[in-house]
Image (tube, rainbow, N blue to C red):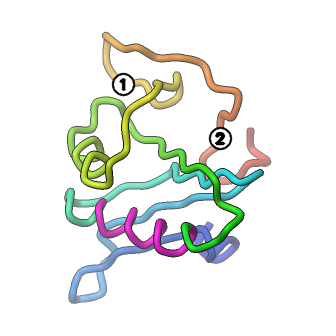
Amino acid sequence: LYEEYPDYAFLASDPSGLIVGYLFGSTHKGILKLRAGISNSQATTVALVRQALQRFCEEPAVEQIKIGFLETSATAKAAMSFFGFQEQSHSFRMFLGEKSNATTSPSIFAIGDPAKG
């Protein structure tokens, strides 16, 4: 994805150059969607989201931001809280565990390539 969509791919590396996190996103009809991602720490997650927000929020075409992550990820929740985001819904594909408030979403995203969906 990084090679195919570099404008929507954000990478974080440690001082030795080892990749310690990534975040992939897209824009569609004024909505910035940040979805597939992983990191080694809350600080890395914050840095990745900051990169994406700095890149896309300067564009007048972005009217709304949606971020998807596992509802059980305390690290992701803390990082999103850092930026002032509020949890609004849960998606079946982001569901993990026995108890959830999962909901359906009209914009299910196939991780890897939208054509796979």
**Kind of residue sitting beneath label 2:** Phe
Report which residue position mark 2 lands on.
109
Image quadrant occupied by the C terminus: top right
> Callout 2: 10 Å neighbours few (<14), some, many (20+)?
some
Q: Which mark is residue 36?
A: none
Q: Is residue 77 shown left or right of residue 69?
A: left
Residue 68 at what x, y percent from top left?
47, 42
Residue 78 sits inside the magenta stretch: no
Say whether disc 1 or disc 2 marks the residue closer to the N-terminus.
1
The secondary structure type at the circle numbered 1 is: loop
**Kind of residue sitting beneath label 1:** Leu
Residue 48 sits inside the magenta stretch: yes
In the depicted structure, whether residue 57 falls above or below residue 75 = below
In the foreground, 20 or 87: 87
Report which residue position mark 1 lands on.
96
Q: Give the range drawn in magenta.
A: 45-56
Cα–Cα span, label 1 and label 2: 17 Å
> Callout 1: 10 Å neighbours few (<14), some, many (20+)?
few
Residue plotted at (21% across, 57% down): 42
